[in-house]
Image (tube, rainbow, N blue to C red):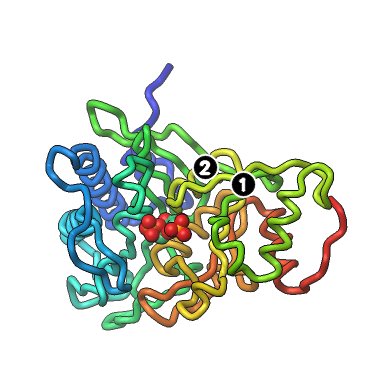
Amino acid sequence: MSEPITLRRFLTRHAEPGGLDPNLIFLIEDIASACRVIGNRLRNAAFEGNHGLAGDTNVQGEDQKKLDVIADEVFARICESSPRLAALVSEEREDAVWLKEPEGGDYLLFYDPLDGSSNIDVNLSVGSIFSICTVGADGDRDVLKAGRAQMCSGYAIYGPTMMLVLTVGSGVYGFSCEYGTGDFRLTHPRMTIPAETSEFAINASRYRLWDAPVRQYVDECLAGATGPRGRDFNMRWTASMVAEVHRILTRGGVFLYPADDGNRTAGGKLRLLYEASPMALLVEQAGGAATDGQTRILDIAPTGHHQRVPVILGSADEVTRLTDYHTTGATPAHS
Ligand code: FDP
């Protein structure tokens, strides 16, 4: 059996159409290096005394874990020397960090250095999410880009196998980190999400806070084979968006973090620029769909670096059904 190709070989020879800008390849390779280092720091966290809280809060008022801070520093340190990277926007930093005077075609990197970090201390899968857009014109310091402007998005998942999953705008590809060499090799070509699924993911403890369309959808799933959906559904919740999206890219499903009475004033739970948008691009590129309930996530015009939005993503049929419930409020026919 021939060896799976490396990330570099994929990016230089297999990306289409017409090949990728070498500076984009350098940046993606820097991101892969940062994720490799973060994976190692996670693995050694107990020995290095890096579990637990950092003792500070981030810009959104959330308690930072020591590893949130470490992962953010690793991302910035490794990526900031990338030749045409103009700015970084991180979950852990209030403002964009400008690295050079922006020129048209330079890159902007958005990242959540450690997503699902409440799972670190219980040793469950966490991840890093990233998104890359370009600077419009010389001197343009606008980083509020709609998701459809992304050139590339992806995540690293630190699970039983460390993986990097990405799209450069045509299909979704998964690379597993080879133990020993540390190489990311293509093990999951053309990841696709089936349109149909019988698995959903939502934090059900928020049931009392949900709007009617979400309650209706979940009630119908829970009713199983004798309910209006006519079949049984399974439920999963890992409380780590990267792990949920990875499961959906692997075997289908639908993930919801909707607007509810507890998060509506904040706009939702998940952040648009470095959580919802990059995941929405991956999900669409894999044949799925992503919405805030009314609007395609990739069409939302951002209004702030840390803006939050409701998120519903995954298998297209279920996302369409949920969108119908939100937009028409109609009680659907059996299916
Ligand atoms: P976390 O706060 O631990 O970083 O990004 C937010 C996020 O995790 C998602 O990864 C995850 O899906 C969600 O929050 C978990 O929310 P709950 O605490 O409501 O379960």
Q: Viewer-proximal residue, 318 or 193? A: 318
Query: Mark 1 and mark 2 in contact (Cβ < 8 Å)?
Result: yes
Q: Viewer-proximal residue, 207 or 97? A: 207
Q: Position of residue 236 (x, y in %)?
A: 56, 45
**SS state under label 1:** loop
Judge left or right: residue 164 versus residue 183. right
Residue at screen point 45% across, 53% down:
241
Label located before the other in sequence (2 or 1):
2
Q: Which residue is mark 1?
A: 253
Can residue 152 be seen in the rendering of this structure? no
Report the amino acid beneath label 1. Answer: Gly
For label 1, the crowd category at 10 Å Cα-Cα, with few meaning under 14, some 14 to 19 and many 20 or more, is many
Tell me where residue 81 sits by quadrant. Answer: bottom left
Tell me where residue 8 sits by quadrant. Answer: top left
The Cα atoms of the two marked residues, 2 and 1, are separated by 8 Å
**SS state under label 2:** helix
Q: Which residue is mark 2?
A: 247
Residue at screen point 28% across, 80% down:
138
Q: Position of residue 131 (x, y in %)?
A: 38, 61
Can residue 143 be seen in the rendering of this structure? yes
Residue at the extreme left of the image, as rendered: 48
Q: Position of residue 52 (x, y in %)?
A: 22, 52
